[in-house]
Amino acid sequence: MLARSFAIVGAGFSGAVVARQLAEAGHTATVFDTRDHVAGNCHTERHKTGVMVHTYGPHIFHTQHEHVWEFITRFGSMMPYRHRVRAMVGDKAFQMPMNLTLINEFFGTNFSPAEAEAFIATKADSTITNPASFEDQGLRFVGRELYDAFFAGYTKKQWGVDPTELPASILARLPLRFTADDSYFNHPHQGIPEHGYTPIVQAILDHENISVHLSTRFEREQASEYDHVVWTGPIDAYFGFEFGRLAYRTLDFEQHVSDGDFQGCPVLNYCDEQVPFTRITEHKHFAPWENHDQTVTYTEYSRLCGDNDTPYYPIRLVKETDQLVNYVHQARAQKGVTFLGRLGTYRYLDMDVTIHEALAAATAMLKALESNQDIPQFFTDPLGGAKH
Ligand code: FAD
Ligand code: UDP
């Protein structure tokens, strides 16, 4: 097959994985990122205290995809890690996600698993059969008291809109258990990279057919220098925000350094609406195999993303905006460009889904090239929502 030249815009997991697959098939990949580091939002770095800090917020790797686990562990060692979160309501910390312990502590009961399940069934609103919004999903899932205490306030702070405007899929991320299991995720593979995410992405990009240009913005006009562009930046930015900006939440982190242990767990959520921040992350608990005398915490505040802020979470309102539809139609009319990843498809994607989709996209691109067909603009429908 004729070797082609690809421009890969973005050196996060999406861009790095596609670049690697194309490079291994004999094509050249020139990777650009405006940031001065690879790994996108998953970037990690050592703080002067020695603690490994997740620069853009807490990142825990978890997956049900065997091939994704095999892929990532080829490029770095993953340490066993179980994520445990606590959630403050008033001045009390509860286990999160909702489990038997939380139910008993919140309601002052001593239920067995079966009793707790029967009790929650009396609370859950069974008249909601097809939950469309976050609120519907919450009320159907656990009922009014738990929803108001743990989800309503946190969600308003995190998303800046009323939970009736948000999709049910956001809450569907969280489990409800009638056992004392307080693991945050259910997936069979879970871990934290021994040396952080950035060396893993560096290793993925370490191939003779790949060149990486950091602190370099790729402009659309450069596309003609390559056979094809893979765009993992924001889809609206590709079109110069022609239909206005898609809405994102951005985060501000307030960093504190102190001695010892600050909160005894990696993430403590603050569910009350009157507390101005959403959660505090204590980074050293992501690496329980390391020892540090000092500790680094991030107090996390969420707000609407401005023009010069980092886009973190796409705000997917229940009423899909015409804006996104316009961008997707515009994109489908383009030749020579593929949109991929969290920003390129404007979806709330975990790392493993990002890698899964990037691997699938690369395979489909290579197939298209072999059969002399045009490479499609999308491999997952951005109007179809996130898949987990
Ligand atoms: P990104 O990592 O955003 O990479 C895109 C890159 O493109 C960026 O580096 C950007 O600088 C670059 N770029 C954009 N435009 C241009 C341009 N014109 N020229 C050059 N470069 C450009 N996932 C999990 O699995 N577990 C977690 O615990 C988890 N926690 C998260 C916590 C937070 C606070 C957030 C925001 C996300 C979390 N995620 C988590 C999701 C995870 O961050 C994403 O799945 C992942 O970063 C997506 O990778 P990506 O390559 O698609 O996008
Ligand atoms: N959520 C909540 N209270 C909590 C934890 C989560 O209301 O204590 C809601 C909130 O809307 C959040 C969503 O559940 O955005 C998904 O939570 P997750 O922990 O997966 O969020 P992420 O780590 O991706 O920000």
Image (cartoon, rainbow, N blue to C red):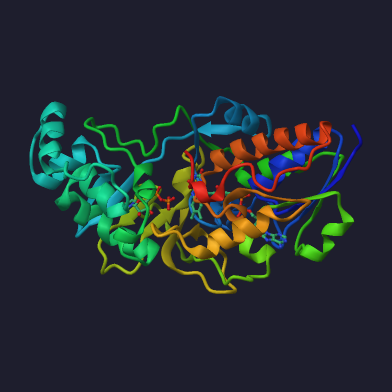
Q: Nearer the viewer, residue 239 or 326?
A: 326
Q: Residue at x 67, y 29 (%)?
A: 74
Horizontal side, residue 146 vs residue 357: left or right = left
Q: Residue at x 45, y 59 (%)?
A: 320
Quadrant of the frame with the N terminus: top right
Image spot of residue 159 (x, y percent): 39, 62
Image spot of residue 384 (x, y percent): 50, 46
Examine the rendering and report whether any part of residue 128 can be seen.
yes
Examine the rendering and report whether any part of residue 46 can be seen.
no
Query: Quarter-wise, where is residue 175 in the image?
Result: top left
Image spot of residue 163 (x, y percent): 31, 59
Horizontal side, residue 251 vs residue 332: left or right = left
Q: Residue at x 26, y 34 (%)?
A: 177
Q: Residue placed farthest to the right in the image? A: 2
Q: Nearer the viewer, residue 30 or 376?
A: 376
Query: Quarter-wise, where is residue 343 in the image?
Result: bottom right
Q: Considering only vertical position in the picture, is 156 above or below 134? A: below
